[in-house]
Image (cartoon, rainbow, N blue to C red):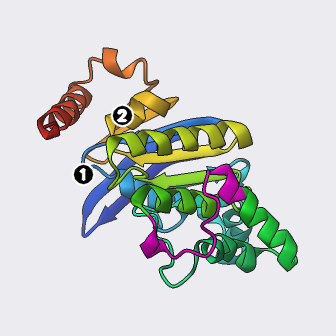
Amino acid sequence: MIEVKNLFKSFEGEFVLNDVSARFEPGKCNLIIGRSGSGKTVLLKSIAGLIEVDQGEIWYDDQKFSHLNASSRQAIRKEMGVLFQGAALFDSLTVEENVLFPLDMFTHQNRKEKLDRANFCLERVKVTGSNGMFPAELSGGMKKRVAIARAIALNPKYLLCDEPNSGLDPETGIIIDNLIKELTVEFQMTTIVNSHDMNSVLEIGDKVIFIFRGCKSWEGSREEILKTDNEALNKFVFATNMAKKIKKP
C-alpha cells in the first residue's frame, strides 16, 4: 500500500500540488489521469522520491517515506520498480545488461542467480532470444517490455509507471496495459500508472484518480468514470475520445 496525505508542492510561488491525498492499494492498477500540466507527473515523481514535496506525508505501508533520510529510503527503493516514459533503457547496454543493471546494483547474488532472474523476467514479458540486442535494434513495444522486465527484476512490492503507452500505437499500448495488469495481480504489487490515455483507464483502471489544476478532483473505478457528473473530468474524457477519433484515417 502507498498513501499520500495532504501533499503540497509549488514552483516559483505557484502550487502544482494542492492538498492531494490518496491511497493506492496492492494488487490493483491505480491510475493517475489528467491533462498536461495538471500536476500528475509531479505527483508520481513525488511518490517516487524524485521530487521533494513542500508539505505532507508519503507512506509506503507503515513507513513514512517522506520523512526518511537518503540511506533509510534506499531500503524502500530496492522494493520499488519504475517504468519511465520512453522506456529509458541504457543505449550502450544490451537487453540482458539492462535487466541485470538493478540486480548488479542492489543485490549480492552470484552471476548465475542474476542471469537466471534476468532471463525469468524477460521470459515473463515475452521477450526471449534478444539478450544480446541493443535498444536501437528494438521496436517501441519491445523496448517497453524490456523496461518492464528491468522494473520487476528485484521482485518489487511497488511499481510506478510514467506514461507506459507513450509513443506506442493503440494495439501495442493495450498489450502493454494488459501486461502491467497481469504482473500487478500475479505479484500483488501496488501499481501506480500515470496516464492520459482513456484506453488504459477503461482497460486496467481498478482505481482512477483525476488531477485537475493540482487538486484531486475525482476518484473512483473505471466503471464509475463514465457516469460521473464532474464537469472537468467529463471534458477530459470527451476531449480524449474526440482526439482519438480525429486521428483515425
Residue extending furthest toward the top: 227
Q: Specify the label residue 36 is tagged with.
A: 1
Q: Mark 2 or mark 1: which is in front? A: 2
Where in the figure is residue 127, as x and y percent of width and height?
60, 57
Q: Secondary structure at mark 1?
A: loop
**Residue 135 magenta-highlighted:** yes
Residue at x 40% of width, y 18% of height: 224
Q: Is residue 139 above or below residue 217?
A: below
CB atoms at circles 2 and 1 under 8 Å apart?
no
Residue marked by disc 2: 199
Residue 146: quarter of image = bottom right
Residue at x 32% of width, y 62% of height: 10
Q: Amino acid at mark 1?
A: Ser
Between 157 and 145, which is closer to the camera in this rendering? Answer: 145
Q: Amino acid at mark 2?
A: Asn
Q: Is residue 54 left or right of residue 118?
A: left
Residue at x 74% of width, y 79% of height: 104
**Residue 156 magenta-highlighted:** no
Residue 34: quarter of image = top left
Look at the image and give the residue range highlighted in magenta: 121-138
Q: Which quadrant is home to the N terminus?
A: top right
Q: Secondary structure at mark 2?
A: helix
